[in-house]
Amino acid sequence: MANNKNSVLKRPAELTPHIIIITSTVFLTLFVTDRFNGAMNFIAHDLTEKMIITCALIYVYQTVVFILDFGSKRRLLSLLLLCALSAFIAVYLLMICVRDLNVDASRLMLLEYNKFLLMIYSLLSVASSVRVIMVQRAYKMSCNRRSGRNYNIK
């Protein structure tokens, strides 16, 4: 993180990319399963929608923390844009799921383009989360070199 003193909840910020990778992989698995057996309809299930809400909130948190910590780095602009795009899609999916939980009559997650949007979000969030992990580790290693700590990494 940029400043250890000013880092927003340092430990959860390091765990969120891993949580997002796991949940996005679950969403991709459910999407593929729905493609092969449409009667199962995993994507429009209430539990899946609650998982989407949770994952979207975690992803928006990760994006805000990443922008606060690394927003001034110009060479990370493409990653910042990817995080912002994924966060925008996450907010859209969040609004759909909250509306679906409140209104039982119309299930918006049943629409095909929303299922594909969930798949695209899952792929984008996995890609950006892997890159966030790499940036966090590279920053930690550079901070350790500057502070004089010498770790033997084998």
Image (tube, grey):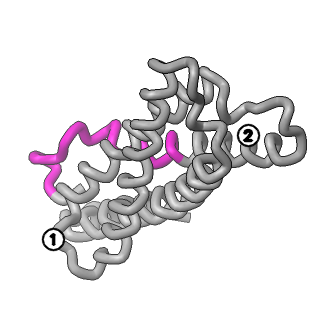
Q: Nearer the viewer, residue 68 or 54?
A: 54
Q: Going by the picture, which residue comes out furthest to the bottom?
A: 75
Residue 26 location, quadrant: top right
Residue 143 x %, y %: 24, 64
Task: Report if residue 152 is visible in the image.
Answer: no
Is 35 colored magenta in this rendering?
A: no
| Amino acid, disc 2 | Leu
Residue 47 x %, y %: 61, 22
With respect to residue 40, does 105 lie above or below? above
Main secondary structure along the magenta-highlighted residues: helix
- The residue where tag 2 is placed is 30
Left or right of residue 56: residue 141: left
Residue drawn at x 14%, y 55% is 3
Numbered badge on residue 72: 1
- The mark tally for this picture is 2
Secondary element at tag 1: loop
Residue span colored magenta = 3-20
Q: Going by the picture, which residue comes out furthest to the front?
A: 105
Task: Report if residue 48 is visible in the image.
Answer: yes
Residue 71 location, quadrant: bottom left
